[in-house]
Image (cartoon, rainbow, N blue to C red):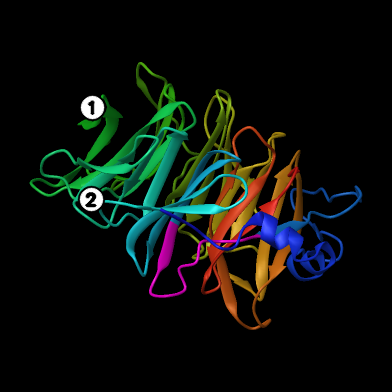
Amino acid sequence: MSHHPVSRRAVLSAGLGAAISTALVTDSASAEVAATGRTAAPTGAPPVWWDIPVPDVSRAGELGDIAASGPRDVWTAGFDGGGPCMFHWNGWDWTRYSTPALYYMVAVSGRRRAWGMGGSNLAGVWDGATWHAVDYPPDTYPPLRLAAAPHATAWAIADHYKYSGYTVMRFERGAWVPQTVPLPIWAEPQVLAVRTNRDVWLSGRNRDRTYTLRWNGAEWTDIPLAEPDTSLGISQILPVSAHLAWAWRLDGVMPGRHTLLRWTGGAWEDIPVPEWYCAKAGMADDGRGGIWLGSDMSQGRTSYLHYRDGVWTSSQGVERLAPDQWLGVWKMLRLPGTRTIWTFGLSPHPFIEELRHAG
């Protein structure tokens, strides 16, 4: 293994004033956004996004995903000039670990357990010291989705190539084990989220509707959407607690339009998004009952929306490109045990931004 030469310590020692002037860029006033009839009142300083150093994959490399079990246990998947690998963040710098195959998805439950999938016919599992290979269940393609959570095992969705269908599987006793899930007929599961071993979510489309299923450790429950359902499906689900979850719905009536969904124990509740915001979003809860969204279609710098208590606000991240050049957020997450948000995206090179004490 080898250490990436750029660390948080190196950034800070280069000069705090320079780091702030070049890496901490926000909009001038965390612009207020009109929606649901309410606007944000001024509440002090606007959000400030930090630039976090990323692993060096500039030579024939790429990063594909990021996941964390805490602020000192973050993994990102990809490859560099030395081949397929994973990079681990310990709170200060990145360490490179070779992997038995190429993975573009990663999930983490703790310092001694993480998983990699996608891009090859072998899955990977971290045992606290090394990455080693694990077979998929028979007759399945490399999985489409992978998810885990702190202190919870991983789940995955894979296409089954011997019949028209999908396999939902869970990691048990060192192996991937298919699960019995009451998927609707002709179902295409597209979204997977894990909060605990007793809080797992699936969503997808069949010929008639978008469906959402929730596992409570004993049974699956269908969580209905508002009728009529004319959407193109749900692109992301974010369970926050036993009584709160968020989702991002792709609306089919108006191409490019989306709706934020909130679940508090019954059916999904529609929350209109500001009209100008039409991008596919990364999502992260703010730790205080609200939600952050990151746009995959921004120019020059990243753009974000925040929603809580009926109020939308917007902010901008680090300036990276010319104002007419595009960049996007691929994934957002709140580092478990903190209120710190990490954003992962491309500009076209990989970047990570951090928002401390979000919301």
Magenta stretch bounds: 52-64
Q: Which mark is residue 237?
A: none
- Eyeballing the image, is 156 above or below 122? above
Residue 217 placed where, x, y %? 38, 18
Q: Nearer the N terminus, badge 1 or badge 2?
A: 2
Q: Secondary structure at mark 2?
A: loop
Q: Which mark is residue 142?
A: 2
Question: What residue is rendered at 42% in x and 34% in y?
Answer: 201
Q: Secondary structure at mark 1?
A: loop
Residue 154 shown left or right of residue 90 in the figure: left
- Eyeballing the image, is 206 above or below 55? above
Q: Are marks 1 and 2 in contact (CB under 8 Å)?
A: no
| Residue designated by label 1 | 180
Q: Is residue 223 magenta?
A: no
Is residue 114 shown to the viewer in this render?
A: yes
Which residue is at the far front? 2
- Could you classify mark 2 by the number of other residues whose Cα lies within 10 Å: few (under 14), some (14-19), or many (20 or more)? many
Comparing 285 with 129, the one in front is 129
Q: Is residue 53 magenta?
A: yes
What amino acid is at disc 2? Pro
Comparing 263 with 125, the one in front is 125
Comparing 4 with 341, the one in front is 4
Comparing 126 with 64, the one in front is 126
Residue 204 shown left or right of residue 57 in the figure: left
Question: What residue is rendered at 44% in x and 62% in y?
Answer: 63
Between marks 1 and 2 in the image, the one whose residue lies nearer the viewer: 2
Residue 21 placed where, x, y %? 81, 69
Is residue 203 shown to the viewer in this render?
A: no
